[in-house]
Amino acid sequence: MNSLLRTVTGPLPVSAVRGPVLAHEHLALDLTRATDHAAFLGARHAAAVAGELAGLREQFGLALVIELTCRGMGRNFAALARISRASGVAVVAGTGWYHERFHPAEVEGAGVEELADILIEEITGGPGGDGVRPGVIGEVGSHGRTPSGPEARTLTAAARAAVTTGLSLATHAQLGFGGPAQLELLTSAGLAPHRISVGHQDLRDDPVAHRELAAAGAYVAFDTIGKEHYQSDATRLRSLLALLEAGHADRVLLSCDISRHSYLTGAGGQGYGHLFRSFLPRVRAAGADEELIDLLTRRNPLCFLTGGGGDGDGGEAAEPRQAARPAGQPVTVPVPGIGTAFGSGAAFDPGAAPRSASGTGSAGRVGRW
């Protein structure tokens, strides 16, 4: 397990991340090539983005953002570093290729090995002129139930780069579909499932599919929380509770996927804080205590990033799950304070106490943390 995170401002010990993590966000991107002119977070939005993150750091202890704007999406490492410094929130940047509609020219005609070499060089070849290197691969995309030919090449190349470099990999599954095919392709390329996050699964109201992905060992990303024009948060909550009840609390990642300037709070949108202000209170109301919230919002994303199966506090990793288990057979994960419906088994070690709003540890406390 990696004990250091590679952030846009330098190495960060896992043990230094004492607050929650947003597992799939965009702080600077440009998807306007698809004629969607609102899908843009540029220089004129940077102060608002940094201000939102700083506010969440102060109010909720936000410690880290996994920023999954990759090649062809208008990625801007220098802007991410400025936003991180201005907000006081650490940022891990991504690499790879989004779905086919956004593939840059470098993908056309390139084979898997050539594409993998591009990523490996970017990750291991030393910092570029902006001094930043990626710390995660993603969001690597497909847009149907099965990847297109070019998407299969970019996904396979990303998996090979992940195996070579030790980075974990997050996917974009368009509208929640295609996750099983992505997982099969990535694991066939040699990437262990506990190093894979299958994206946008909260857009699909399919608890069976969620359980099967989790049972295979992958992370199931509920990462578009607050985008109610795609899916209601009520449905997301029901799907999340079903996954917890099946014993898969340790396979969940949460985020909001802010991907256009109209989603910023200053523009009247839900903002990066929707998870903390709106959704997590509903999870608490359903019976979750602070140890479970800490698992979902801090320990899980840290274990995903580091490739570990342990406590998310920089200690020794527990053995990762098996590469695959029989579909539908849950891993029982004991979750204190929620009751046996959400898991049972050996004693649960929460690691360090989750951070409270005042900055003092308060394991098991219900309310703002």
Image (cartoon, rainbow, N blue to C red):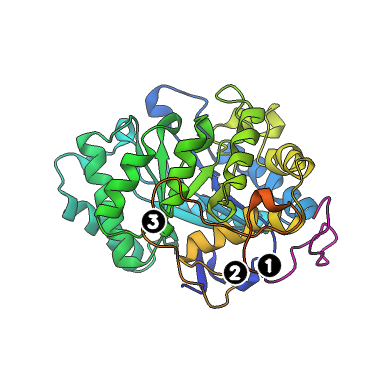
Determine whether 312 is above or below 168 in the image. below
State the SS at label 1: loop
Residue 34 is left or right of residue 149, and the answer is right
Q: Residue furthest bottom?
A: 316
**Residue drawn at point x = 74 percent, y = 37 percent:** 278
**From the image, which quarter does the C terminus lie in?**
bottom right
Mark found first going from the N terminus, 1 or 2 = 2
- The part of the chain drawn in magenta is 350-368
Cα–Cα span, label 2 and label 3: 18 Å
Q: Which mark is residue 350?
A: 1
Residue 359 sits inside the magenta stretch: yes
Q: Secondary structure at mark 2?
A: loop
Tell me: residue 167, above or below residue 138: below
Marks 1 and 3, the one that precedes in the sequence: 3
Residue labelled with disc 3: 193
Residue at figure coordinates x 69%, y 65% from the top left: 18
Q: Could you say which disc has been placed on residue 311 in the image?
A: 2
Q: Amino acid at mark 3?
A: Pro
The residue that appears at 46% across and 42% down in the rendered structure is 199
Categorize mark 1 by other alpha carbons within 10 Å: few (<14), some (14-19), many (20+). some
User: Residues under labels 1 and 2: Cα distance?
Assistant: 7 Å
